[in-house]
Amino acid sequence: SDRAWDILYQTVAVLKEAGNEAVRSSLYSLAARRYDKAINYCSIAYLEFQVGNCAFLAEHQIVISGNGGYECRWSPLFKLLIQVRLNLSMCFMKEEMNDVKSAISQATTSIKELKPFSTEKGVVLTGKRLDRRRGDEPESTYLEAKSLEAKALFRLGSAQLSLGDYDDAVKSLYRSIKASGDNPDKAVLRKLNEARRGSQEKKESQKRKFKFMFGSSINENDDNETLEEESKVGDDN
């Protein structure tokens, strides 16, 4: 059983490194295919039902099914899965691929999958609704989960920013800063400032638009009133 898990981990790790190599060569489509293959291999371990004759997964799948489909045991394989998802999200954002919706999907899935580990230090959430708490979890689990959550929120905020969803981007990037323990990467701060400027400019543009619309309406009313008055004057004559 341990041997099978180790082979699965090594397979995913090799695919991840192959994806990283493609990224270093700016071959983002190739990297995405390799990351996607890594996720497909990895996801076998996190299905709620057994596939084929993978007996070594049976016990693990029972646990996942009892926890609403969530993985509630921190492991090198699970951590690797999240890292691959975030790398894939980054590839989707590149001009070569320009698939922002898929970038958002990988980021939000990562945030969701990290929830049992990133909510409270020393605790893992369990149960079908994640409404139970398992204590005595090493502090390192929480810290690693929060670090990955910060990166996932950065990916999400960056994707929202590229779509012009400035307010959502600001919220995601603020959450990324909080998840990083208020010690964010400079790239996060740059994106946050960009999202703030975009939000402010969008609001000012809307104000000008409404002012123009209502201003035109007022002018039209004034013109109508003037014509009515001129008409009355003409009638009196």
Image (cartoon, grey):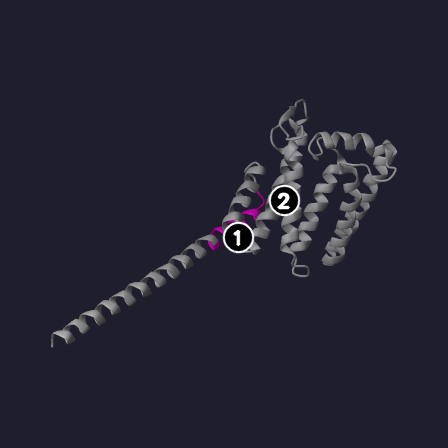
Tag 2, which secondary structure? helix
- How many residues crowd mark 1 within 10 Å: few (<14), some (14–19), many (20+)? some
Residue at 61% in and 41% down? 150
Q: Tag on residue 165? A: 1
Magenta stretch: residue 193 in it? yes
Q: Provide the residue span drawn in magenta.
A: 184-198
Q: Quadrant of the C terminus?
A: bottom left
Q: Nearer the viewer, residue 233 or 72?
A: 233
Q: Is residue 16 visible?
A: yes
Q: Are marks 1 and 2 in contact (CB under 8 Å)?
A: no
> Residue 23 in the image: x percent, y percent?
73, 54
In the rendered image, which residue does mark 2 sit on?
Answer: 108
Label 1 or label 2, whichever comes before in sequence order: 2
Disc 2 marks which amino acid?
Thr
Q: Quadrant of residue 71?
A: top right
> Residue 97 in the image: x percent, y percent?
68, 59
Residue at 66% in and 37% down? 114
Residue at 67% in and 35% down? 144
